[in-house]
Amino acid sequence: MFNPLRTLDDFNRYAVNRKDQMEVIRQSLYDFQAYAMAGQTSLTFFSLPIGQGGKTKADTNLTTAGSLPAPIRFAVQTMEVYFIPGVFPSGAPAAAGIDNHVNDIWEVMTGTAFLELVIGSKPYLTEAPLLRLPPAARMDGFAGMSDATTAAAALFSRTSHLHACGALYRIDPVLLLEPNQNFSVTINWPTAIGISVAGRIGVVMQGVQARNSQ
């Protein structure tokens, strides 16, 4: 339902041009990078801003390394981990594509990894497995394959329907990231967990951002 706008005060409450004032908006912080085929023992997120290390806005919306520029403040409300397999469910051969797609998600999201959020020099969140931190947005549906090249008695089909799902992991109470305050999110593995094809992994923190109006 739309907010009722009946008076001039109602309109002014949502003005984007307010000199020398702050505004509060809903905006996530996100950071994505490659997941190596051979695996790794540690990945650090929010360490490289846009324009460094080949990072674009498709990879991150961080503008300064490991911190927020003044006067931006950010209240962290949720923590999500996204893993995008590098193999298509219908990859060739189809059976292997389905199997590898599903297996790679299973290995990464239910394996031995743990996530840690550090603000300043202090850990504020340590959680495992990554399945505890499901994404809010995900592909839903199924993939299927049937084999009609063999005798009728040997016909078979394969289907897959796998993704990390569940209630959002909520940070309660919220954690406030102050301007120029160092922070990082790491995902760590006791031993590297390999996958069939290099994929992509990311961390998204939903929350509320306070910034200068214009």
Image (tube, rainbow, N blue to C red):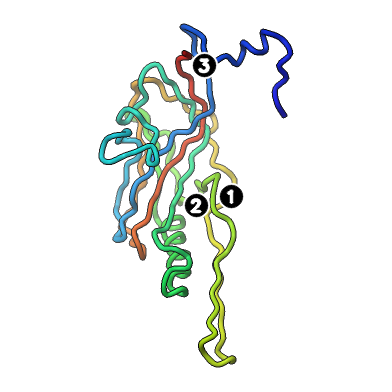
Residue at 51% from the left image edge and 9% from the top image edge: 18
Report the Cα–Cα distance between label 1 and label 2: 9 Å
The label shown at residue 131 is 2
Residue at 42% from the left image edge and 58% from the top image edge: 85
Are circles 1 and 2 on residues that touch, CB within 8 Å? yes
Is residue 51 placed above or below 148 in the rendered structure? above
- Disc with the residue nearer the chain's start (2 vs 3): 3
Q: Quadrant of residue 67?
A: top left
Residue 171's spot in the image, x, y percent? 52, 34
Residue at 68% from the left image edge and 8% from the top image edge: 8
Q: Mark 3 points at which residue?
A: 23
Could you say which is closer to the camera, residue 208 or residue 97? 97
Mark 2 falls on what kind of element?
A: helix
Q: Mark 1 points at which residue?
A: 166
Residue 6's spot in the image, x, y percent? 74, 13
Residue type, numbered disc 3: Glu
Q: Quadrant of the N terminus?
A: top right
Q: Quadrant of residue 192?
A: bottom left
Is residue 50 placed above or below 189 in the rendered structure? above
- Disc with the residue nearer the chain's start (1 vs 2): 2
Neighbour tally class for label 2: few under 14, some 14-19, many 20 plus, Cα within 10 Å: many
Q: Which is in the foreground here, disc 1 or disc 3?
A: 3
Report the Cα–Cα distance between label 1 and label 3: 32 Å
Neighbour tally class for label 1: few under 14, some 14-19, many 20 plus, Cα within 10 Å: few
Residue 95's spot in the image, x, y percent? 47, 75
